[in-house]
Image (cartoon, rainbow, N blue to C red):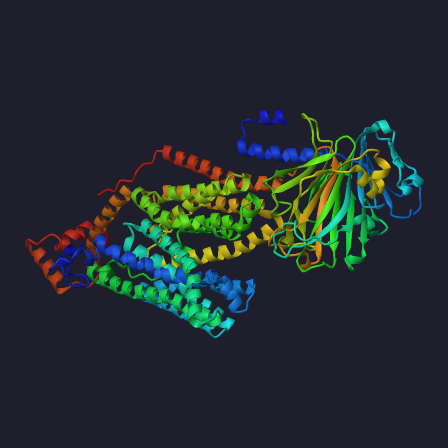
Amino acid sequence: MSGYEGEASSGPTPAPRRADKPLPAICDPNHLLHRVVVLVFMCFLGFGSYFCFDNPASLQTQVIKDLDQNTAGFMQLYAWYSWPNVVLCFFGGFLLDRVFGIRLGTIIFSLFVCVGQVIFATGALVNRFWLCEVGRFVFGIGGESLAVAQNTYAVNWFKGKELNLVFGLQLSMARLGSTVNMNIMGWVYSKVADLVGSPGHFTLGISLMIAGVTCLFSLFCALVLGFLDKRAERILHKEEGKTGEVVKLTDVKDFPFPLWLIFIICVGYYVAIFPFIGLGQVFFIEKFNFSPAEARAVNSIVYIISAPASPVLGFLVDKTGRNVIWVLIAVVTTLAAHMMLAFTFWNPWIAMSVLGASYSLLACALWPMVAFVVPEHQLGTAYGFMQSIQNLGLALISMVAGTILDTRGYLLLEVFFCTCVCIALMAVVSLYFVDYLRGGDLNRSASSRASLLKEAEESKRRQSQVTEVDSAKLTPMSAFGLRNRYLSRLGAQLPHHCSTHLSSLAHRSVLK
Amino acid sequence: MAAKGKGSCKVSLLFRFSVFSFCYSLVTAGQTYQRKLSVQLNPGFHSPPGGDLLHVRAVGENDTLHYLFCSQGAPTLLLVHTNTSSSTLKVNWTQFLDRNVSGGLEVEPKSSVLYSTAIVFSKLLEYDDFNDTAQPSSTFFPLYDLQNFNWSRLNLSGSTSLLCGTEGTLGNGSLCLQLSVFDVEGRGEAWPRLLHTANSSQLELWLDGVSPRSNHSRFLLELLAVGGAYTPSHVEIHRSIDDEFTPSMFSVSRWVPELNGSHQVPGFFQWKPVAYRQPHPVLEDATSCHHSDPLPQSGETAAAMSGLIRAFYTEPEVFGLNVSFGLAGDPFYNSTRFLSWTLLAGVGSPPMDSISPLVISMMAVGLGVPLVFVLLGSVYVCTRKTVVTTPYQPIN
């Protein structure tokens, strides 16, 4: 592409390509090996925030005891994270697109995560619970927006390549982060307690500070990613591909219809997963006569399955394409799993395993679809908006689900969740037809996507030629152009991309 | 109904299912069996010493149900089912109050009696569950014998009656029993919202403000089921997917007679294994209960304990079981000092909860609309495909 542009030098002059010495594979942004390196940093970018997000849960008894709280107070630590994010990650995504740019934005959000965790730990250290809440709030500002940044980064680097796999890997990293946290923080706390001499708020603070190291690590990843992205942009001349359009807040109302359908799927689906898992433990004890330990195990199987399954399923989606069909499969199997739990006494291990697999499949297939329907400059805003309404849905539906359970029991709760999944199902079906009728990209197979990509590059190349010609018509002629024109009028033989009268014949209507 | 279902075979299966269920609920609502209730306190006597006798006569089309509730001795509910709508109760008050020989209370004509059964609330037990195992084998406190309680006069309002008993060691607290007799099918308003028919009555028992004898006290209730021919002798546990009316309870316990062959159940005692720790409970106030296996008991002991059993049965057959409240880990009685439990007693087969129309319609709409989407979508796509489009050919 750049070779072509090098000849036609009437546009803005691009930086000369350093093609003189070929880069080794690991340093070449076009090469898979380099992308793998980027992927590693991308995955660990979110690790810190996922690790620290669940710190209160893994140290629940300690937090309650050391900070002298009850369960309601403890839940505040999560509320201070969640509620602000109903709006914040939308603005986070918007700022990412409009103000900071992806690189600076990611670093800023990582900083927020670090600072938030430090404030949280300090609050525990000095035994001020309000300070802990402030810390969680600051942590929340960074955490969710960082996830938006992570998605945007993934699309920037992997669209048209291994995007679904990358989303799968990111999900499994998130699960890994919280699993490691759940298993390690108790141990860290007891070690710190041994060192300090006695458990207490001071010990808790130190443990949380230690957990904060993961956030520092993520910040480091953000810096490295920023550097690599900058470098890739320089080498690949990504700037040229940019249209120069900027996102406006009002763009949200002009989001394409398929994107809204994707939002509906996202909300309808996730509200039937997370609130259910939150309320699931008692359900398994009461309905299936499980022991509390067994109930905890079956409840966590969804997350345990999703860690290894999501990269595999992501790979599968990459190889086959047809994201809408995969989403449809995920939604239908989820519906089946919920109906199994609601209407049968079958062993819940079956239903929950199915749920785990379909949840991973959905995460791999749904989130990348956004990249196909919105232009690049709106990507952060779109992901931020998606995450915001997901948070809003989760917050509201959690409350509704609690009320339904308290008054009408688990059967109606399950039926309610089935209804939510059915809404998602309607949206998927609509998405399929809308995409089919519009001839969209969402449900193409991988091979046709690849050939389309090739075609697109081809036409882009052609288009760049055309636009140059167009702009040549509109801008005052350069001395070079003027001379060419003159020469051609004289009848001199010119290379035909320089010959203006040929181009003006091709665009006769413009001359009229 | 079946004929209608066959006739409308062109409707989709799902739609038919929902229509069927709606029709079914309409039909059952329309055909609800109604009985005429007449309530009489101490028939033929004015305020007998030692406790009241309540007689509720529920007259159906060609049968009568007699409910007798009495606190002469331990509180007892007696159900007598007769096959005529003109059977009457005859009480010989001197014999009845003496409590020496049977025959003090009869339902006449005697030949019309189809089935009779009674339930005696005989004892209340309290144990110190120091290790929080909820295994009532550990240290029992001296038991409360309910026949020695001071029972209040029956407090009547409509077809419900309230009986409260106190005892010295209970402190200011009391054990209360509320009997509700129903003339039509319906459902209790308070949890566990048991479904009842016109053939059943509901007994709610609560233990309010009793001072427990330890901080880790849990309670048990001893119940005796008495019968002539078919005595309730075993408890069946029916699991159900439906907890709509009693959140987080997925089973029903039924104390029914052992039947040889496929006879219809003549009578039952039914409860859900749940008790509540507050008078106006929320879900967290629910506590599970557990019952022991029914064991045969001496008929003479039961007759000595309860005036009603002595007067009605000559040779009562008795089975007894304990209902224990609370599982390991549940809060102790001391936390709220309240415990309520509900029992349904009736004749015929016990009422069964069925999945409510709300659930069925939610599922039908939820599954139906995406199907309709698929159909409409494919029809639209097909028609679009068949229309011959003239592709626009650019001129140059």
Direction bottom: furthest residue:
A126
- Count the numbered circles shown: 0
Whether residue A116 appears in this view of the structure is no
Whether residue A74 appears in this view of the structure is yes
Give residue A221's position: percent from left, percent from top: 30, 63
Residue located at (46% from left, 41% from top): A350
Q: Give left or right: position of B145 versus B275.
A: right
Q: Quadrant of residue B300?
A: top right
Give residue B180's position: percent from left, percent from top: 78, 44
User: B288 or A332, which is in the foreground?
Assistant: B288
* B292 up-or-down from A381: above or below: above
Q: Quadrant of the C terminus of chain B?
A: top left
Give residue A255's position: percent from left, percent from top: 40, 54
Residue located at (24% from left, 44% from top): A451
Q: Quadrant of the N terminus of chain B?
A: top right
Q: Give left or right: position of A329 versus B75.
A: left
Q: Quadrant of residue A438?
A: top left
Q: Give left or right: position of B345 versus A323.
A: right
User: B116 or B376, which is in the foreground?
Assistant: B116
* A169 up-or-down from B264: above or below: below
User: B201 or B20, which is in the foreground?
Assistant: B201
Residue located at (19% from left, 63% from top): A12
User: A297 or A345, which is in the foreground?
Assistant: A297
Q: Give left or right: position of A483 versus B363.
A: left
Q: Quadrant of residue B258?
A: top right
